[in-house]
């Protein structure tokens, strides 16, 4: 993967944008993040890795195909959302210029907290795909409603006991042990006993996107 030099991130975004030198120096101040975020486009929601961010743009590692001038929105682990436009694409990296200047400390502060889990909630994407759940000796058809590296929300007509351990099967991921964190109104939250690494998640989503494109 080819990465643009960190110290000139915004210059790499658009080297001919006519910025004055003091504006370039201001834009070059950036923060290395290296955290997973949710990437929203007009076509889908995916995960990505933020590499660095400034008050005018960011650089991210993605596994889905994006085009120059495509509008994108990122939702941070903090719950903050920032929007912009793709201005360059190199291998699996993209450069994005924001539609408006942001405050980087504010965007990276105040992490989104999930009261049910008692910890920071990892970024998740909405999906609608079939899965199987093994609870005791009962095999249950479920629908996966959203998924993250750490867990998923499912819809099922079968009541599940909070705190119980189950096994979830999902095409492309295989079989994973999970704990039922909550159940209400036909939906349940599952926490994977062994979370997905980002490469595992990314490879799975690449397969999903390829299958969808071929259908």
Image: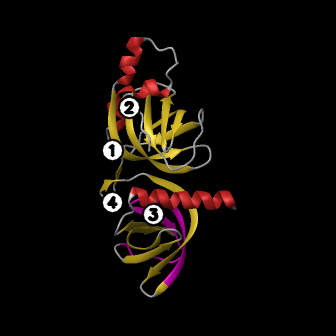
> Which tag, 1 or 4, sits closer to the chain's start?
1
Label 1 to label 2: alpha-carbon separation: 28 Å
Asked if residue 176 is among those painted magenta in the image, a careful observer would answer no
SS of the residue under disc 2: loop
Query: In the drawing, does residue 1 fall left or right of residue 88?
Result: left
Q: Are marks 1 and 2 in contact (CB under 8 Å)?
A: no
Instruction: Name the residue located 40 percent from the left edge and 12 percent from the top edge.
Output: 21
Q: Marks 1 and 4, how far apart in space?
A: 14 Å
x then y, percent, for residue 15? 49, 21
Q: Is 44 drawn above or below residue 143 in the view shown?
A: above
The N terminus is located in which quarter?
top left
- Residue sitting at 42 percent across and 77 percent down? 167
At mark 4, the secondary structure is loop
Q: Between residues 7 and 114, which one lies in front from this camera angle?
A: 7
Question: Mark 1: which secondary structure?
Answer: loop
Residue designated by label 1: 111
Q: Give the residue pinned by disc 2.
A: 5
Magenta residues span: 139-162
Query: Which of the two discs, 2 and 3, sits closer to the camera?
Result: 2
């Amino acid at each position: 993967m080819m990465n643009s030099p960190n110290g000139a991130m915004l210059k790499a975004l658009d080297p001919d944008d006519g910025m004055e030198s003091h504006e370039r120096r201001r834009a070059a101040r950036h923060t290395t993040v290296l955290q997973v975020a949710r990437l929203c486009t007009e076509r889908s929601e995916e995960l990505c890795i933020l590499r660095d961010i400034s008050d005018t743009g960011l650089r991210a590692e993605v596994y889905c195909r994006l085009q120059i001038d495509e509008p994108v929105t990122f939702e941070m682990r903090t719950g903050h959302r920032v929007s912009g436009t793709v201005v360059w694409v190199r291998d699996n990296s993209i450069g994005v210029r924001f539609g408006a200047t942001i405050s980087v400390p504010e965007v990276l502060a105040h992490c989104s907290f999930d009261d049910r889990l008692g910890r920071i909630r990892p970024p998740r994407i909405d999906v609608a795909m079939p899965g199987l759940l093994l609870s005791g000796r009962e095999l249950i058809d479920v629908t996966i409603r959203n998924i993250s590296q750490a867990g998923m929300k499912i819809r099922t007509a079968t009541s599940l006991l909070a705190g119980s351990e189950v096994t979830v099967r999902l095409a492309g991921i295989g079989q994973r042990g999970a704990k039922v964190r909550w159940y209400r109104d036909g939906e349940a939250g599952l926490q994977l006993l062994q979370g997905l690494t980002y490469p595992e998640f990314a490879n799975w989503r690449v397969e999903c996107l390829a299958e969808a494109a071929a259908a």
